[in-house]
Image: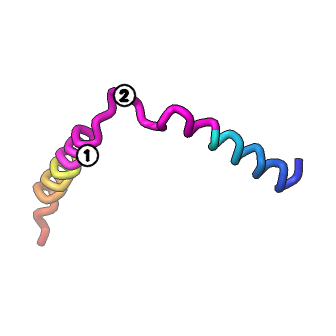
Amino acid sequence: MSFHSTAAQLVTLAAEGQEHGGNHASLSPYLTGGGAFVILMLLLWVTTRFNRDR
């Protein structure tokens, strides 16, 4: 398989994936972002509680 034929197959595969819009109906960007923010804030809080050697 050459680089050109592999690239052409990947482009075809990517184009087929765009037919349905790409997003799952149950994924809310606000809920996903809010959940990630809460988890990151929790990790920051835990990190600062254990890092008392300042």
The residue under the point 68% across, 39% down is 13
Q: Residues within 10 Å of mark 1 (few under 14, many from 20)?
A: few
Please determine whether, in this image, residue 25 is positioned above or below residue 45. above
In the rendered image, the residue lying farthest to the right is 1
Horizontal relation, residue 34 to residue 26: left or right: left
Numbered disc 2: secondary structure: loop
How many numbered marks are there? 2
Residue 13 part of the magenta-drawn span = no
**Which label number is shown at residue 33?**
1
Q: Find residue 6 and name its label.
A: none
* Residue that appears at 22% across and 51% down: 40
Badge 1 amino acid = Gly
Q: Quadrant of residue 48?
A: bottom left
Instruction: Locate residue 2 relative to residue 21 in the image: left or right.
Output: right
- Which tag is nearer the camera, tag 1 or tag 2? 2
Residue 26, horizontal then vertical, whole percent:
33, 27
Q: Write down the region rendered in magenta.
A: 16-38
Q: Is residue 2 left or right of residue 23?
A: right
Label located before the other in sequence (1 or 2): 2
Q: Residue at x 12, y 72 (%)?
A: 54
Residue receiving disc 2: 25
Q: Residue at x 63, y 43 (%)?
A: 14
